[in-house]
Image (cartoon, rainbow, N blue to C red):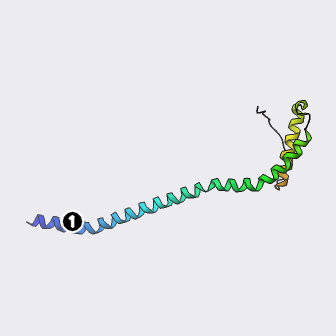
């Protein structure tokens, strides 16, 4: 009969801290999952950051495009690759300078691929 009494006393001593540990575990898991949901929400907002930048830059790009189009109007088939690279480089340079980006050494075009 003493063993049963000792076992029940042991369980009574362990039950309180075990319940506290369970509550701490559940609260910790809730905090972790809430922070993961918050981080995924912040990451999902990144797509709007790109759209804000493009909406500010879009009118400037449209202002450069007609100037380039008017340069090669009428002789679209007679432009060689060097002239095409020069036109593209000038358009990129004008666009970047309108955004406030100035290059010390100029712009270097590594390659131009024609899309047909």
User: Which of these two is toward me, 56 or 33?
Assistant: 56
96 to the left or right of 16: right
Comparing 17 with 78, the one in front is 78
Residue 31 appears in view: yes
**Residue identified by numbered label 1:** 11
Give the quadrant of the N terminus: bottom left
- Determine if residue 103 is in view: no
Task: Please identify the quarter of the rendering in which residue 13 is found.
Answer: bottom left
Identity of the residue drawn at 81% across and 50% down: 61
> x, y percentage for residue 111?
79, 35
What secondary structure is marked by label 1?
Answer: helix
Q: Quadrant of residue 19?
A: bottom left
The residue drawn where x is 42% and y is 60% is 29
Q: In the rendered image of this protein, does residue 30 appear above or below residue 81?
A: below
Binning the other alpha carbons within 10 Å of mark 1 as few (below 14), some (14 to 19) or many (20 upward) gives: few
79, 43: nearer the viewer:
79
The image quadrant where one finds the C terminus is: top right
**Residue furthest to the front:** 74
Q: Position of residue 58 (x, y in %)?
A: 77, 52
Q: In the rendered view, would you say 102 is above or below 13?
A: above
Q: Does 61 sit left or right of 19 as displayed?
A: right
């Amino acid at each position: 009969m003493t063993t049963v009494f000792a076992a029940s006393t042991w369980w009574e001593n362990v039950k309180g801290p075990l319940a506290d540990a369970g509550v701490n575990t559940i609260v910790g898991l809730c905090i972790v999952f809430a922070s993961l949901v918050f981080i995924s929400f912040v990451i999902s907002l990144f797509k709007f950051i790109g759209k804000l930048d493009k909406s500010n830059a879009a009118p400037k790009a449209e202002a450069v495009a007609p100037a380039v189009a008017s340069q090669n109007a009428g002789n679209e088939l007679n432009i060689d690759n060097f002239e095409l690279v020069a036109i593209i480089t000038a358009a990129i340079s004008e666009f970047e300078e309108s955004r406030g980006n100035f290059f010390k050494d100029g712009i270097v075009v590594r390659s131009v691929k024609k899309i047909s």
